[in-house]
Image (cartoon, helix red, strand yellow):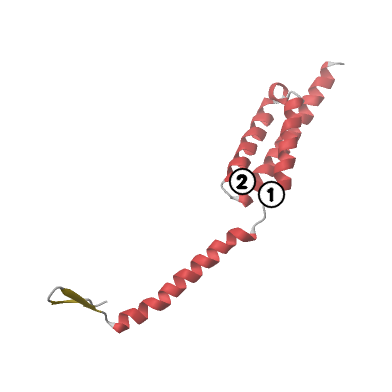
Amino acid sequence: MQNNFLRDGDIIVRTFNLNSLIRTVPSTILVLTLCLFLGSCGLATTRPKLEMRMAQSAFVAAKEANAQTLAPGLYRKAEFYYLKAKSSYKRKYFNKAKQYAILSQKFAEKAEYISIRKKALENL
């Protein structure tokens, strides 16, 4: 882009090269279109409300079954993935939040099952 500054007394006159202006318009349109497309991708994903609720209820059930002492490894994994799911959900990373919620539910259900089984075997 060719810029010429001419002083005419106190007035500064700036001249532009028309060819450079014509070249920047298509690239500006391309950048704006790309931003619009990428911005709309966030609108296409849905919030994983059901998965988050299921993970929460499974985690609470595992906690009530005393899984933190009877199945601590699985309980910790469930807690870790549940907290990651909540964090991803708050940051609006809904795909990651859904994956973490499903993993949390899986580990919480396993921890609950093992803790209930251990309690039942202790009473024999």
**Which quadrant is the N terminus positioned in?**
bottom left
Q: Quadrant of residue 10?
A: bottom left
Q: Is residue 110 left or right of residue 93?
A: right
Name the mark on residue 48: 1
Instruction: Name, please, the residue furthest toward the front.
Output: 10
For mark 1, give the secondary structure.
loop
Above or below: residue 50 compared with residue 104: below
Q: Is residue 111 among the parts visible in the rendering? A: no
Q: Amino acid at mark 2?
A: Tyr
Q: Is residue 60 among the parts visible in the rendering? A: yes
Residue underneath mark 2: 89
Q: Are marks 1 and 2 in contact (CB under 8 Å)?
A: yes
Q: Amino acid at mark 1?
A: Pro
Q: Residues within 10 Å of mark 1 (few under 14, many from 20)?
A: some
Residue at 74% of width from left, 46% of height from top?
50
Which residue is at the front of the view, 26 or 108? 26
